[in-house]
Image: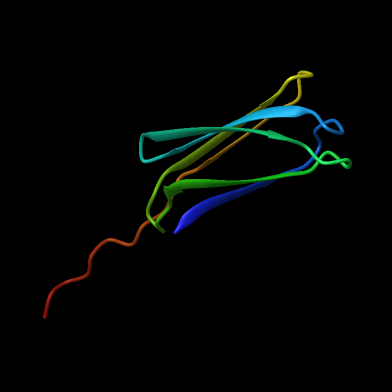
């Protein structure tokens, strides 16, 4: 399943470099924010429910955003 990231608060038409890291695999995309400062990026590196995900977005005009998702995965239960 691909990783899809949405962001807001960037400048209208601002060029933004978005880097996603899923379990230490990195992928970077360059996109332009829309007229209202929103963006949406699709990454080929997928995410599972137990994957650590970090996303950093840096705009050409100095805008920045970051998020880190640390999963809480269930421990395997007893067998039998």
| Front one among 53 and 35 | 35
x then y, percent, for residue 39: 73, 43
Residue 79, by quadrant, is bottom left
x then y, percent, for residue 63: 76, 24
Q: Quadrant of the N terminus?
A: bottom left
- x 45%, y 45%: residue: 70
| Front one among 25 and 79 | 25
- x 42%, y 33%: residue: 26
How are the residues colored?
rainbow
x then y, percent, for residue 51: 39, 49
- x 79%, y 28%: residue: 14
x then y, percent, for residue 57: 64, 30
Query: Is 71 located above or below residue 78 in the figure?
Result: above
* Furthest residue toward left: 80
- x 46%, y 47%: residue: 44
Q: Quadrant of the C terminus?
A: bottom left
* Furthest residue toward bottom: 80
In the shown orientation, is residue 18 left or right of residue 70? right
């Amino acid at each position: 399943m691909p990783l899809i990231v949405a962001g807001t608060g960037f400048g209208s038409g601002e060029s933004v470099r978005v880097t996603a890291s899923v379990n230490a695999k990195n992928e970077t995309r360059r996109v332009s924010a829309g007229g209202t400062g929103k963006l949406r990026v699709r990454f080929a590196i997928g995410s599972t429910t137990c994957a650590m995900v970090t996303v950093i977005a840096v705009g050409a005009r100095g805008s920045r955003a970051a998020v880190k998702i640390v999963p809480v995965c269930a421990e395997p239960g007893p067998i039998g």
